[in-house]
Image: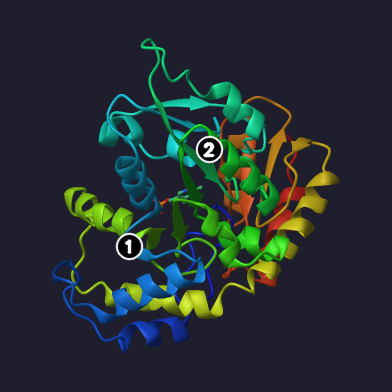
Amino acid sequence: MFLEEADFRSDTVTRPTAAMLDAMQTAPVGDDVLGDDPTVKKLESLAAERFGMEAGLFCPSGTMTNQIAINVHTRPGDELICSPLAHIYNYEGGGVAFNSGVQVRTGGDAYGRILPEDVHRLVQPEMDVHAAPSRLLVVENTANKGGGTSMGIPLLKNLESAARQHHLAYHLDGARVFNAIVREGESTEDYALFDSISICLSKGLGAPVGSVLLGSKEFIAQGKRIRKRFGGGMRQAGYLAAAGIYALDHHIDRLAEDHEKAAMIDQWLAALPYVVERKPCQTNMVLFRIDAVGGASALQAHLAQKGVRIMAMDTEWLRIVTHLDIQEVHLQQLNKGLTSFKP
Ligand SMILES: *Cc1c(COP(=O)(O)O)cnc(C)c1O
C-alpha cells in the first residue's frame, strides 16, 4: 500500500496489500484458545513443516515467541548466552528477568554474531556452586542491532555443536530469518538444527501482526500453556493467521528487492562526508554513525521536515530499513534529504 510518508524506520510499518486483506477476510476461523481455528492450525503446521520442525504456535508478537521459548528452556536462576546487541537483551522490556528470572551473559562481535569460541568462554563451570547454570544459547539471524547481519548455516551449525557440547538449548530469534535465507540462498529446512525458532510475519513479510514459535511437539505443548499465562491466547485469530499464510506464500522472494534498495542507500551514505561509520549492509537495513554527538537527532529532524522518517538508535547511530511499501518516490525523497543535510 502507498505510504504518504517515506517511512524507513522499520520493516514493521507496512500495511497489508489488497490481496492479503482479501485472504484475511475470507479465512475460515474459530476459537483458537479452544483449539477450533482451522486457519491458525494451517499456519502453524505450514511454518513448522517448512522449517523441518514438529509443531508451531501462533503468537501476537516476536517478543512473546522469544519470551515463551526462554521460559520453557530455563528455570529461575539460570543463565542464557546471547550477543550484547540481542533483541531479547535490549528490546524486550527486561522480560528475560521479569518473565523467567533468568540472567544474561553476553559475547560476540560488533555485528551481533556469536562464535563457538565465545560460547566456550561464556559457559559457566557446571560443578561450581558460585555460578548460575548456563542453560540456553540464543542467536539472532539476521542480527538487527548488528546491521541486519546474516550468520550463515555453517556458523549456525558450529554453534549448534558448541551448544550440544555444553548441554545448552539452542534458540533462534529469527525475526528476520527470511532475509538471511534469501541473501544466502539457504533453504528453510537448513534451520531444523535449532531446538526452537521464532519467526516474525510482521517484519519484512508484511503481515500486520504475528509471529510463530517452532519446536518439538512437547516444547510447543508447554509453550501453549505459557502463551496463555502471558495473555497471548487469541480467539478468532485465523484472520491474522491468514495474513501470515499469504505472506509465507508470496512475500519471501521479493525480499531481494529490499536488499537491493538497502545496498543502494548504503552507497549513498558512503559518499556523504558526515557519515563516519557504517555497519556492513547485508540485508534490508543500513546502520550508520554520524559525526557530532547529538547529530543523530538533528539528521532525523531534518529528514522529518522533508517527510522522511528514519530511526535514531542513540545520539550517533541511525537506522534505515527498506521494506514492501518503499517505492521509488520514497527513495528519491530520502536521497534529497540526506544530501541536503548540513551538520
Ligand atoms: C522485531 C524483532 C522481534 C520481535 O518484536 P515484536 O515487535 O515483539 O514482534 C524479535 N527479535 C528481533 C531481532 C526483532 O527485530
245 or 276, nearer to the observer = 245
Q: What amino acid is found at the position of numbered circle 2 in the picture?
A: Ala
Element under disc 1: strand
Residue 74 sits above or below residue 48 on the image: above
Q: Mark 1 — residue? A: 57
Residue 15 sits above or below residue 315 on the image: below
- Indicate the position of residue 254 as horizontal and vertical percent values: 64, 74
145 or 272, nearer to the observer = 145
Q: Residue at x 36, y 64 (%)?
A: 56
Element under disc 2: helix
Gap between marks 2 and 1 measured at Cα:
24 Å
Residue 145 in view, yes or no? no
Q: How many marks?
A: 2
Residue 295 sits above or below residue 266 on the image: above
Taking the view exactly as shown, the residue that stands out farthest to the top is: 130
- Indicate the position of residue 130 as horizontal and vertical percent values: 38, 10
- Indicate the position of residue 167 as horizontal and vertical percent values: 46, 35
226 or 248, nearer to the observer = 226
Q: Mark 2 — residue? A: 163
